[in-house]
Image (spheres, grey):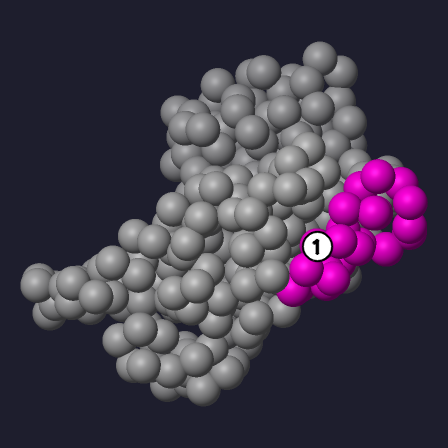
Amino acid sequence: MKFYLVDDEQSILYVLQNIIEQNFDDEVVGMSSDPQQAVNEIQLRDVDIVLVDLLMPEMSGIELIQTIKNVKPQIRFIMISKVQDGDMRAKAYQAGIEFFISKPLNIIEIKSVIKKVEQNVQMAAQLSSISAMVNKFNTQPDPQSQSVTDQATTILKALGMSSERGTSDILHVVKLMKIHHLNYRSLDLVKILGISNHEKKIMEQRMRRAIKVGLVNLSNQLIDNPYDEGLSNHANNLFGYENVHAQMLHQQGKQLTGGRITLQKFMDGLIDEESFHD
């Protein structure tokens, strides 16, 4: 894997470089304490994973990630920070990071996180290969499954989830559910996709993160438009209105915890024709 490192502390850069390059399959192709320079170099170089500090002068780590993702959405990001603020961390995850590494640095944590992200990259490559093979042998897609995918795409866009990494996984699974005529619980993704249980868990983690973003966005929409029937239908079918209501109260500062998401509820809701009527 090819890494790029961004941190305003030079000592941190060298520590990370030494840890990463202990694995002969990994290479640090660049590092910088200047975030703007880092943006320019990452856009020009072949990079798989970026480790970036959260708080830097001139440009935050979140701003750097958002800038690069517009050009190279496939790059994975690991955030380095001593900040424990929950809202700040939530914004980092929404921007697209995979994991946090806390300061002061811990070698065991760094190695563990890097290994997990490398596995994510490898699994994404495998899924892309599988998808390419499926498309090759299905040059004439089933109109019904295609229609469901189009409808699901419309809903995910309405929920502000289009840019989330887990959205492509959600659409792929929706298509499989329709093809095999199964609900989410009955769908054996390990067997159908030829992946391990660990890879399935990573994929579901991406899906949950994307769905959480959808819950937050839908709650904000309902706060502004409480009598919108279409939004209420999405709330009931995809999340359960009690969860959306809890999330609304949380975002308004009226309770500490937000709503819960359930993969099965959300995925089955996308298949349910009732959820497609605005």
In the visual, does 152 lie left or right of 212? left
Q: Relative to 50, does residue 268 appear above or below in the rendering?
A: below
**254 left or right, relative to 151:** right
Most foreground residue, 55 or 137: 137
Horizontal side of residue 278 vs 65, given as left or right = left
Q: Point out the residue furthest to the top here.
A: 58
Q: Amino acid at mark 1?
A: Val
Picture quadrant where residue 51 is located: top right
| Image position of 98 with respect to 267: above or below | above
Asked if residue 243 is among those painted magenta in the image, a careful observer would answer yes
Residue 126 colored in magenta in the image: no
Density class for disc 1 (Cα within 10 Å; few <14, some 14-19, many ≥20) is many
Please provide percent x and percent y for residue 258: 80, 54
Nearest the viewer among 107 and 157 is: 157
The picture places residue 224, in percent across and down from the top left corner, at: 68, 33
The residue at the point 58 percent across, 16 percent down is: 36
Magenta stretch: give its range: 240-261
Check the image and report above or below for 203 versus 257. Answer: below
Q: Dot 1 corresponds to which residue?
A: 244
Q: Residue furthest left?
A: 140
**Secondary element at tag 1:** helix
x then y, percent, for residue 135: 17, 63
Residue 76: x and y, percent?
Answer: 52, 45
Residue at left offset 50%, top offset 28%? 68
Q: Quick check: can you spot residue 208?
A: no
